[in-house]
Amino acid sequence: MGIVNVTPDSFSDGGRYFDSRSALAHALGLIEEGADILDIGGESSRPGSDPVSLDEELRRVVPVVRALAGASDVPLSIDTTKPEVAEECLRLGARIVNDITGLRDPEMMRVTARHSAAAVIMHMRGTPKTMQSEPAYGDVIGEVKQFLAERVSAARAAGVRDISVDPGIGFGKTAAHNLEILRRLDEFQSIGCPVLVGPSRKSFLGSLKGQQETGGRLEGTLAAAVISAMKGASVVRVHDVDACRRALQVADAVRQS
């Protein structure tokens, strides 16, 4: 899953693809690199970020979704927490709703089900504004699994059928929590849904020596992506599609040998 941030303030590439023309060019480049899915977002979810208005988010993502839907058959995912944004993007041709709040808004469930869209249900403690304010768990794996399982059950009851789960690396977790999630990622398969992981350029990689800047976290991202695949992840959400695809080809060859 290639990341297309149409934002001025995302933690890694904020502002680089803020206008629709550069975002479209970036997205088409990710397809050339081998992205199987494109995830388009118009609101940053970096730690400490503020929400944007509905009109502004629509202004950012609608032209990109419309253009990509007409230019490629690669499935489009809309990364949003707003049902109105999901509705419009699904109408234009997006096929997946990626909701960092885990479809907690009943209207988001209804929109997703009405369009027979797939959903990514993610775990997040708090909001992007507050999530990294001393996150604490008694049992991070057990608590995240329980939340995801409950949300999957609710989504299925609402008519959503195609569901993936995302444990939410970096969303209300310390570096130690994130490393434990990666180490025990295979345990999330008991929920009964494909597992999606988004470790790309995350700050927990920066806590490791020599990877402080986001631009210097490629090697850490590759390691996390390969570990995720070996632990059963079906989808890895990344910025660096070409490098990650080549690394994952090795992981897939080992798994299938």
Image (cartoon, rainbow, N blue to C red):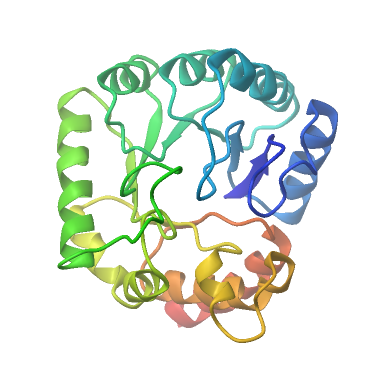
Image quadrant where residue 60 sits: top right
In front here: 158 or 130? 130
Residue at the (65%, 24%) spot, across then down:
61
| Residue 194 to residue 60: above or below | below
Residue at the (21%, 52%) spot, across then down:
192
**Number of callouts in the render?**
0
Residue 167 image point, x, y percent: 33, 56
7 lies left or right of 232: right
151 lies left or right of 196: left
Extreme residue in the bottom direction: 209
Residue 241 image point, x, y percent: 68, 58
Residue 173 image point, x, y percent: 36, 62
Q: Considering the image in quadrants, where does the C terminus appear? A: bottom left
98 lies left or right of 2: left
Residue at the (22%, 31%) spot, across then down:
155
Residue 134 image point, x, y percent: 34, 61
Image quadrant where residue 120 sits: top left
Residue at the (19%, 48%) spot, across then down:
147
In front here: 7 or 200? 7
